[in-house]
Image: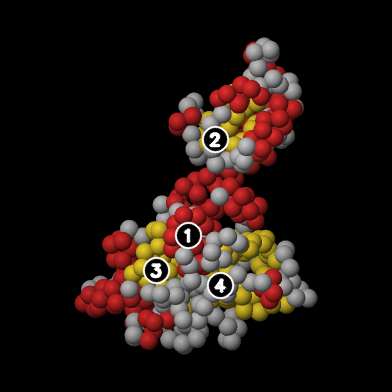
Amino acid sequence: MKIYLKSIVSSFHDDNQIEEALSEFNERLYKSLKEEDIELVEKHSLADLTISYIKSGGTENIFKESFEAQAINLLLTTDMHNSLPAGLEIHAYLTEKGYNAEILHGDPELIAKRIKSFLLIILAKEAIKKEKLGVIGKPSDWLIASDVDYERIKETLGIELIDIPLDEFYRIWDEFSDLSTSTSYDNEETIANYDRGMVEEANRIYKTLKVIINKYGLTSLTLRCFDLVNEGCGTGCLALSYLNSENIVSGCEGDIPAAISMIILNRLTNQPVFMANPSRIDIAQNSVLFAHCTLPWNFCTNKELDTHFETNLGIGVRGYIEKNEITVFKLNSRANEFYVSHGQIVHSGNEDVLCRTQITTVLDKDVEYFLQNPLGNHHLVIKGHYQGLIDKFFEVL
């Protein structure tokens, strides 16, 4: 991640005096930026983000005359030489013109972290614009609130949705009947100790999806997976688990809004995303139990294989996820409303009346949202506290 600090100082001030006064602040800031893996570059053209460094008062018109708008316009200020007062005036000017702006002020270490969050947003925004999401089969019949307007998603987020019929999947699947279905995951103890025939069936789905990914240049996909069971191909749970661990965002049941939500979460945080059903709500404890029969293979270390819950066929993945901070997220089908909440995993279970991976979470926001105005069934879970980052992403977007 690269930034350019555009120095802005008034001619009324002595440059050398200002630089001397700022030396300690700059030293701490540059060190903190380096610790956040942010590189300072000498040219605007080399940077992912240019930050206006307001070093003194009397700089308002200097800024105005050289201003070039960005998705987010950051003003770095200090507590010396009327830097902050100038920043306040510039910020008011930018917001009156309708630009997204923020003042960076205070502790250099916190400023570096704030800069990193904006860099993550900008880089994610650019990555999402290049996203090609393969819709392999239509959404499952029960996802009655999950239709999307392809053109609106392209216009709003930049994601290109590509319809791919299941017939193409079956044709490629058939071609693997006489080919090797071994994968690099086969030597892992969890896989090696499971029924070999079932594993080969799941591997065949994984390899079929890899062919489709390469053919269409996909960066992500959602699969109408229940139909595969009816056609005797097995379940897609293990294949989707592998793909998600490889940063190829892969959703279940052909759920397009959930897949789009997964893309945003993954590209923004670089964390693997668990797509799940909210399966149990406890209002008194403000808790939600999330469950599904797959999760990214790299989401946790303690995993075991079982059958898929609803069909009792194929392979489902049960992950035992350690207690952790989490963020829960969902974008609606029109991409104009979202839910996000910070929370904690308090228990990881294995009840036989629910999908194989089960986590009980306590959320910061009122869980009555799920009962009163949910944005559909599937919600997305990642480890870590990213609520503020997600809020800011949509503000910038």
Residue 195 vertical placement versus 130 (above, below): below
Tell me where residue 271 appears, x and y as whole percent.
53, 57
Quick one: label 4 or label 1, which is nearer the N terminus? 1
Query: Left or right: 323 with respect to 81?
Result: left
Of labels 3 and 2, the one closer to you: 2
In the picture, the disc for residue 135 is 3
- Kindly report the distance in space between the C-alpha atoms of the residues bearing marks 4 and 3: 16 Å
Tell me where residue 314 appears, x and y as whole percent.
41, 83
Instruction: Please rate how many residues cluster around mark 3, counting C-alpha atoms within 10 Å: few if below 14, some from 14 to 19, many from 20.
Output: many
Quick one: label 4 or label 3, which is nearer the N terminus? 3
Quick one: label 3 or label 1, which is nearer the N terminus? 3
Residue topped by disc 4: 378
Q: Is 171 or 313 nearer to us in this picture?
A: 171
Residue topped by disc 1: 152
Residue at 50% across / 81% down in the picture?
Answer: 142
Query: Left or right: 31 with respect to 282?
Result: left
Residue type beneath disc 3: Val
Quick one: label 4 or label 2, which is nearer the N terminus? 2
Residue topped by disc 2: 69
Tell me where residue 35 appears, x and y as whole percent.
58, 38
- Kindly report the distance in space between the C-alpha atoms of the residues bearing marks 3 and 2: 36 Å
Residue type beneath disc 4: His
Residue type beneath disc 2: Ala
Instruction: Please rate how many residues cluster around mark 1, counting C-alpha atoms within 10 Å: few if below 14, some from 14 to 19, many from 20.
Output: few
State which quadrant residue 322 falls in: bottom right
Quick one: label 1 or label 2, which is nearer the N terminus? 2
Residue at 54% across / 46% down in the picture?
Answer: 120
